[in-house]
Image: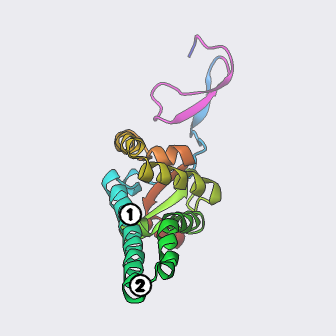
Amino acid sequence: MSSVTTPGNYHAQGDPPGTVRYWDGHNWVGGPTTINAPTLPHVNFDQYARFWQRATAHVLDLFILAIAMLSSLFATVMTLWYTNSMQAGDSYYYLILLLPFIYLTIRAIMIAKLGYTPGKFLVGLRITPIDGTSPPGFGPAFLRTLMDILVTFLLPVGVVVLLVSAVLVSIDDERRSVYDHIASTRVVYSSYLRSKKAQ
């Protein structure tokens, strides 16, 4: 340090990593002290959801929607069969058309207020803001739902998003997908949030 004349805190050769001590311009003064760098709320890498778990949750969400739509279709057919009235089946027909939008709205509210979709709940995953552990709120929930609409109803877009997400989740430090980067969220295991609340 003889070449450094400006007083200040520097790392001294031979001191432990992550420490500094005061240099008065000529000599070291005092012993080494630990650098207390501020850190954002963070979880262990093992607590981030893997791609196959996210994919499983998405498939479960689609399966739940499919069951609801098939149930409405079955009710429509049965109504037409027993009443021979097209008008009687119209209400079920419109319900089938509206079900995807109703379901997406319910999912958006669940993400905003609870931090999960039905599929993620069953797999044991939670969606949180990038800098915390609470549910993400309506802004991120809207963006994630918009991505769901594109992925589900525009097949080419869906394939590209899923492929890019698979790559991102495998290389990102927090295993964040395209959804997460757009909505500023991350997906963690429910067990991590329970452990945080218990602390």
Dividing the picture into quadrants, the one containing residue 71 is bottom left
In what quadrant of the picture does the N terminus appear?
Answer: top right
Q: Residues within 10 Å of mark 2 (few under 14, many from 20)?
A: few
Which colouring convention does the figure follow? rainbow
Compared with 4, 108 (above or below) is below
Q: Amino acid at mark 2?
A: Asn
Numbered-mark total: 2
Q: Nearer the viewer, mark 1 or mark 2?
A: 2
Across and down, in percent, residue 175 comes to 41, 47
Under tag 2, what secondary structure? Answer: loop
Q: Which residue is mark 2?
A: 84
Q: Residue at x 42, y 78 (%)?
A: 76
Q: Residue at x 48, y 64 (%)?
A: 100
Under tag 1, what secondary structure? Answer: helix
In the drawing, does residue 16 fall left or right of residue 53?
A: right
Q: Amino acid at mark 1?
A: Leu
Q: Residue at x 67, y 18 (%)?
A: 25
Q: Which residue is mark 1?
A: 62
Across and down, in percent, residue 102 comes to 54, 68
Q: Is residue 110 magenta?
A: no
Q: Residue at x 46, y 56 (%)?
A: 187
Across and down, in percent, residue 196 comes to 51, 66
